[in-house]
Amino acid sequence: MNAGSDESGISIPNALESGSAVDTVVGQLRELISNANLKVGDSLPTERELCAQFNASRNTVREAMGVLKAYGLVEVRPKVGATITDNRMSRAFELFSFNTLEISKKTFIDVQAFRGLIEVGSAEQILDRLARRDVDDLYRINSRLAEIEDINEASEIDFAFHVRLIYILDNTAIMDVYKVMKPIILRIMQKGKTRRTYMTETYNEHDKVIETLAARDRLGFQYQLRNHLMIGTKNFTEETEDMP
Amino acid sequence: MNAGSDESGISIPNALESGSAVDTVVGQLRELISNANLKVGDSLPTERELCAQFNASRNTVREAMGVLKAYGLVEVRPKVGATITDNRMSRAFELFSFNTLEISKKTFIDVQAFRGLIEVGSAEQILDRLARRDVDDLYRINSRLAEIEDINEASEIDFAFHVRLIYILDNTAIMDVYKVMKPIILRIMQKGKTRRTYMTETYNEHDKVIETLAARDRLGFQYQLRNHLMIGTKNFTEETEDMP
DNA sequence: ATTTAGAAATCTGGTCCAACAAATACTGGT
DNA sequence: ACCAGTATTTGTTGGACCAGATTTCTAAAT
C-alpha cells in the first residue's frame, strides 16, 4: 500500500537539488527513515522496492545503501534485508583506526588549536568553579598513567584527563563536541609517543598542570597547559616535511 | 567464465578472507594506499584499472570506492578520478547531524559560552591573519541585515557573519563544529529577537565588531564581540518560562 | 483429520556485464 | 596561442545470474 506515489506522470529527471543521483537517494532514504519514524531494529523495504519508490536503478540504490551502511545507520544481511541500527559511534572510531592513512598535518594543527582555545581559554571559568574533588580526580586519573600497559590505554587515560578538566566547566555543548572528537584526539595523542613517553613526559606535564591549578595560578596553568599541547605539535612536525 | 582469457591458473574465488567481494576490495584499496604510501592529494588509478588489478567488476569497485568516499578518505570527481583526502573528522561530525530539539536555557548558555571561547578567544590569531578582503566581506554580509524579509533569513545572515569571522582562522575543525551546531545556533540567534531587532541592534553590534577589527583594536574587538554574545543571553532570560 | 517433515517455488541481496550519458582532459589543426 | 573535435573517465541504467534464506506446498506419519 505504497502511498499514491504511483507513476502519475511525475517523471522528474533525477536531478532534484543535490548533486548526484546516489546522493539524492541517500537523502530520500534518510527522509524515509525519518518520516516513517523507523526505530532501531525495524526493516527497510527491499532494494527492488526502493528502486520503484525512488525511481532509481538498483545499482544506485545499492550505492546509496552502502553509504548508509558505512555511516552505521543500517545493517544489511544477505538474502534477508536491511534493518535500522545505530553504530555511528563505533563507525566514528573506525574512521580513525584506518591505519592506511595517517592524520594529516593540517588536521593535527587544527584540532590542537581548537583544544587550546577551549582548554586554555577557559582557565578563568575553570578556576572559578574548581573544587577539591576536581583536583583529586585529576591526580587520580593521571596516576594511572604510571602503570599503563599499552599505548591505547595510555591515550584513553590522557583523553580522560582532559575531559575531566573540561568537565569542570559543566558545559554540555563542549562535552558533546569532545565526545564526537574523541577518536581524532586519541589518534593525535598517540602521534610520536611511545609507552615510555606517556609514563614520563606526559605524566609530568599533567602533573604540573594540576599543581598550578591547585595553586590557583591562572597564568601558570595556562602556560603549562599550552606547553603540553604544543609539545604534541613538535612531535608531529619532526617527522614531516615543512610547509612554507 | 568471464574474460579469463588472460593468464588463467589462478582461479582463486575472490573470497579471500573477508566476507563480501566489496569488503575485500575495500581492504585491497587500503592496502594499495598503504603500500604505495599515497598521501593527501595523490591520485588513485581509474576504476577500470582497479577492476583489472583486483579482478573485480566495476560495480564492486564502485561500491568499495563509495565506502572510502563515505569514510572521507577519497574524493572523486567525474572524469578526473579519485584523489586521497582526509575529511574523516568532517564525516565524524556529519554522523551526528540531526535532532534539533527545543533549546533549553542551559543549552543556550552553554552554546553561547562555547562560541565566546572560540570567537573571542581567537582574537589574536584573527588579527594576525586579517586581510582587507575579510573586512570587506564582513561589511558586505552585515549590510544584508538591513534589508531582510523574515527572521529566518536574518538568522542565516547572522550565522554567516560569525562563520565568516571564524573562517579567517582557516581551522577546519572549528568550521566543522560550527557546521554541526548550525541548527542549534540558528535557533539561539532567533531567541527573543524580532525582525526589527536584527535590522537595528544586531546590525549595529556587528558593525562595531568590524570597526574594532579593522582598527586592529584587539581589546575593543573582544569587548564588542563578548557584549554581542551576552546580549542574546539577556534576551533569552526575559521571555522564557522554564520547564521542569 | 491433524501434524509435521521434506521438497519445491519464490524472494533477496551479491556480483557481474553491457551500454549510454555527461563532463572534462587531451590532441590536432589553424 | 586559441579553438574544435575526439577520447577517456565517471555517473547511471537495465538486465542477468547465483547462492542462500524464506515461504509455500506436498506428502508421509500419527
Image (tube, coloured by chain):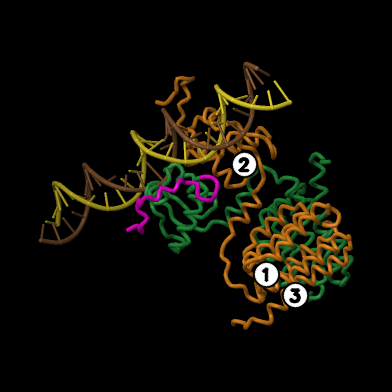
Chain colours: A green, B orange, C brown, D yellow
| Circle 3 residues within 10 Å: few <14, some 14–19, many ≥20 | few
- Where are the magenta residues, as a range? A1-20
Q: Where does the N terminus of chain B fall, quadrant-wise?
A: top left
Q: Earlier in the sequence, mark 2 or mark 1?
A: 2
Q: Give the residue number, with chain letter if any, for mark 3.
A: B231
In what element is the residue under mark 3?
helix
Q: Is residue A14 magenta?
A: yes
Q: Earlier in the sequence, mark 1 or mark 3?
A: 1
Where is residue B27? Give x, y as percent. Answer: 56, 39
Q: Is residue A67 left or right of residue A176?
A: left
Q: Is residue A208 visible?
A: no
- Identify the amino acid type marked 3: Ile
| Subunit under mark 1 | B
Q: Where does the C terminus of chain B fall, quadrant-wise?
A: bottom right
Against B211, residue B84 (above or below) is: above
Same chain? Circles 2 and 1: yes
| Helix, strand or loop for the magenta stretch, by majority | loop
Distance Cα–Cα, label 1 vs label 3: 11 Å
The image's mark for residue B75 is 2
